Amino acid sequence: MKMKNPAHPGLVLKTMCLEPLGLTITEAAKVLDMPRAALSEIVNERRGISPQVALRIEKAFNSQAEFWLRMQSTYDLAHTDPQCTARVQVVQKPAELTENHA
């Protein structure tokens, strides 16, 4: 089921990881070994979490990279204009895909 307005992963990172530990963006950027500006953009919901950043968060905050990437994917899908498929044509699936993966 598609969430109507899922939280941006940057907000979750801020409220579940940085704030409870009293970390500033500058301190967290040092911990994550990434540029402060890049982390600021994530926390302020202007940039998504990449696989590389998800792995850094996993190690630093004892979480799962897959959690962060699923959250980012859910957020991205919820904020993608469904009209992007308006001119896409439906094609028949090859029988071998339907039979082997049903």
Image (cartoon, rainbow, N blue to C red):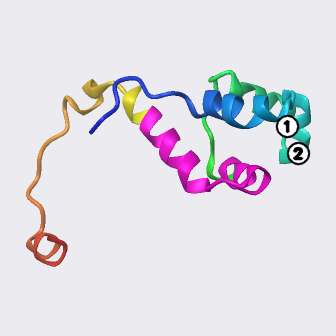
**Relative side of 92 to 52, left or right:** left
Q: In percent of the image, x 43 and y 38: which residue is there?
A: 74
Of residue 91 and residue 55, the one placed in the foreground of this image is 55
Residue 101 on the magenta span = no
**Relative side of 75 to 64, left or right:** left
Magenta stretch secondary structure, dominant:
helix
Q: In percent of the image, x 63 and y 27: which residue is there?
A: 11
Count the marks: how many? 2
Amino acid type of the residue that numbered disc 2 sits on in the rendered structure: Val
Pinpoint residue 8: horizontal percent, then vertical percent.
Answer: 55, 29
- Residue assigned mark 2: 31
Range drawn in magenta: 53-75
Q: Which mark is residue 72?
A: none
Pinpoint residue 5: horizontal percent, then vertical percent.
Answer: 40, 23
**Relative side of 30 to 39, left or right:** right
For numbered disc 1, what is the local secondary structure? helix
The relative height of residue 44 versus residue 76 in the rendered view (above or below) is above
- Circle 2 packing at 10 Å, graded few (<14), some (14-19), many (20+), is some
For numbered disc 2, what is the local secondary structure? helix
Residue 68 on the magenta span = yes
Q: What's the distance in space between the residues labelled 1 and 2, CA to CA?
A: 5 Å
- Give the quarter of the image for residue 97: bottom left
The relative height of residue 12 versus residue 100 in the rendered view (above or below) is above
- Residue assigned mark 1: 28
**Relative side of 67 to 54, left or right:** left
Q: Determine whether label 1 and label 2 are within 8 Å by CB.
A: yes
Which quarter of the rendering shows the N terminus? Answer: top left
Pinpoint residue 30: horizontal percent, then vertical percent.
Answer: 91, 41
Pinpoint residue 19: horizontal percent, then vertical percent.
Answer: 77, 28
Q: In percent of the image, x 75 and y 49: which residue is there?
A: 61
